[in-house]
Amino acid sequence: MIHLKQENFYDLYELNPLINRDKLREWYELNKDGVSEYYNDPTQKANYYDITESVASGYLMNTLKIGQGLTFIAGVRLEQENNDYKNAYSRQSGGGFPSVTLLTRDTTSSYTESVVLPNFHFNIKATDFLNIRLAAYKALARPDFNMRLNTYFAWRPAAVGGNRQLIVGNPILKTAKAWNYEINTSFFGNNIGLFSVSAFYKEIEDMYHLLNQINTTGNVLFNALGLNTTTIHKGIIS
């Protein structure tokens, strides 16, 4: 950047703007050979990955009818996931001008988890125009694979005083499980058609979240999440 300044000649005449010779020489040395806008950006390796995810499952179900008005359905599903992830990481902070320099390395991680998912459904035909259905079942939600990548990239914006930034994945991130409880009442007939009232309740455990723009100090957040890693930044991390 060329810095311009203002000076007074004999304290009588304003001479401006004037070019700072030292800054001009510095700018020339940095730009005399030119900089291609297509220079290699090693930070893009944070988005490179190779994954293999496989899920094996089995399911059993049985229906039991009691008389004409009661139906009980019970089942269980067993799922096991085996995943392998390969991506890049860096244990140093990225920076440099006019192009970023960053030493990246390859890393691998794996994740395995087995989940049992039972379900129960109970239907009561109370009258010719009234059905009551009760259900309790367990379901799951898997996180996006890039949340489990063993990613570690540190940044510091060029602006003076900019917050330090750190991108970290969680290779031990669990699959979220939820118990669901539902009750449904249906009224029907030739005169009223179909009228239903439902209610449900859900209990979730191991729910995952993508934390973005979270400020923390040192390794406080890593320790809270149970991650066996440390930051290379000192002070506030954004």
Image (cartoon, grey):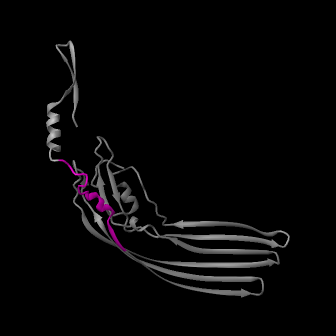
Viewer-nearest residue: 185 or 30: 30
| Quarter of the N terminus within the rendering | top left
| Residue 206 placement (x, y as % from top left) | 48, 66
Q: Is residue 180 visible?
A: yes
Residue depicted at x 38% and y 67%: 148
Viewer-nearest residue: 222 or 27: 27
| Residue 37 placement (x, y as % from top left) | 25, 51
Q: Is residue 39 magenta?
A: yes
Q: Is residue 16 above or below residue 27?
A: above
Q: Is residue 74 above or below residue 110?
A: below
Q: Is residue 162 magenta?
A: no
Residue depicted at x 78% and y 86%: 68
Q: Is residue 230 visible?
A: no
- The part of the chain drawn in magenta is 34-51
Residue depicted at x 29% and y 55%: 154
- The quadrant holding residue 212 is bottom left
46 lies left or right of 102? right
- The quadrant holding residue 121 is bottom right
Residue depicted at x 21% and y 60%: 103
| Residue 177 placement (x, y as % from top left) | 52, 70
Viewer-nearest residue: 157 or 21: 21
| Residue 178 placement (x, y as % from top left) | 55, 69
